[in-house]
Amino acid sequence: MTDSKLLFEESHQQRVVHLVLNSPANLNAMDLEMAAAFREATQTLQGRPDCRALVIRGRGRAFSAGGDLEMLRLKASRSTEQNEREMMEFYSSFLGLRDLGIPLVCALHGHVVGAGFCFAAACDLRVGDTSTLLAAPFTRLALHPGMGGSYFLPRVFGPDVARELMLTGRRMGAEEAFRRGFLCRLSEPEALSEDLDSVLTSLLKSAPEATRALLSTEREAQKSDLARALQRESQEQAQCYARPEFLQGITALQNKRQPPWQ
């Protein structure tokens, strides 16, 4: 792949593929260009039966700051029907990696926010360093959660913690994320690559067909509930884009000031 928003690397004798979010200037915010790159990556990896694990990580100071704000602002000028359709396509561009049947491992550092946080929750394993800072501040932007957040966050944190994170938008530090089981390894920044390598080495000791079967069982059990959650999220986000408070929230954030309801 040549798309600059997503780099394609390999390790462990080409048995592990790394997808590197490559938009560090805006903290790897997820936009349409990055979504297209993820769709291309999924298509490429469908023809790679030798790939045993997939790592997703980010260049620069953060894993991902979530959805690109200018992309979201443009939603206010489109119809509810178009926004609903486009949000479903956007979610599937990233979450389509789950259909590959191989373990998805997120290597996290810095800000892991909004859609980036929800995407990390959709992966199978997560390692992170002590700079990792998680947040799902959708409602602070006058938005309903998306990218499967309403489904995945309760699964990894439990419903009460997930509800609190989504209702308040508060930040969760790396130590709490590790204590709550969101991170399977917590590293100092200089040791993150080594700990990631340790997790990958352990994964590669498992038989590939048995691993695929296990993931298939889990994915199949989740399929209908996840599909319903994504459909509901796309509908609710489309409704949010049409409300005046959404533009107020986006404008306030871009201008680094508080929205009127605060």
Image (tube, rainbow, N blue to C red):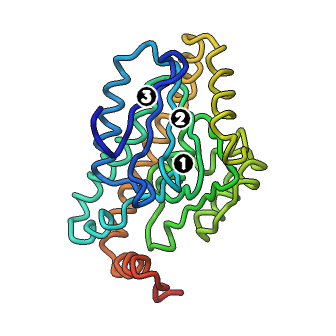
Q: Which corner quadrant of the image does residue 69 belong to?
A: bottom left
How many marks do you count on the picture? 3
| Residue at screen point 67% across, 44% down | 190
Q: Nearer the viewer, mark 3 or mark 1?
A: 3
- Give above or below for 74 relative to 133: below
Quadrant that contains the N terminus: top left
Q: Amino acid at mark 3?
A: Asp
**Residue located at (37% from left, 69% from top):** 240
- Residue identifier under label 1: 151
Q: Secondary structure at mark 1?
A: helix
Disc 2 to disc 3, C-alpha distance? 12 Å
Gap in angstroms between the C-alphas marked 1 and 2: 10 Å
Q: Is residue 165 above or below residue 256?
A: above
Circle 3 packing at 10 Å, graded few (<14), some (14-19), many (20+), is: few
Q: Residue at x 62, y 25 (%)?
A: 200
Residue 110's tag is none
Going by the numbered disc 1, the residue's amino acid type is Tyr
Q: Circles 1 and 2: CB distance less than 8 Å?
A: yes
- Seen at 46% across and 89% down, the residue is 260
Q: Earlier in the sequence, mark 2 or mark 3?
A: 3
> Which residue carries the number 3 mark?
99
Give the number of the mark in front: 2 or 3.
3
Horizontal relation, residue 196 to residue 50: left or right:
right
Residue carrying label 2: 222
Kind of residue sitting beneath label 2: Gln
**Distance (Cα) linking label 3 and label 1:** 17 Å
Callouts 2 and 3 close, C-beta under 8 Å = no
Question: Crowdedness of circle 2 by 10 Å Cα count: few (<14), some, many (20+)?
Answer: few
Nearer to us in this view, 41 or 129: 129
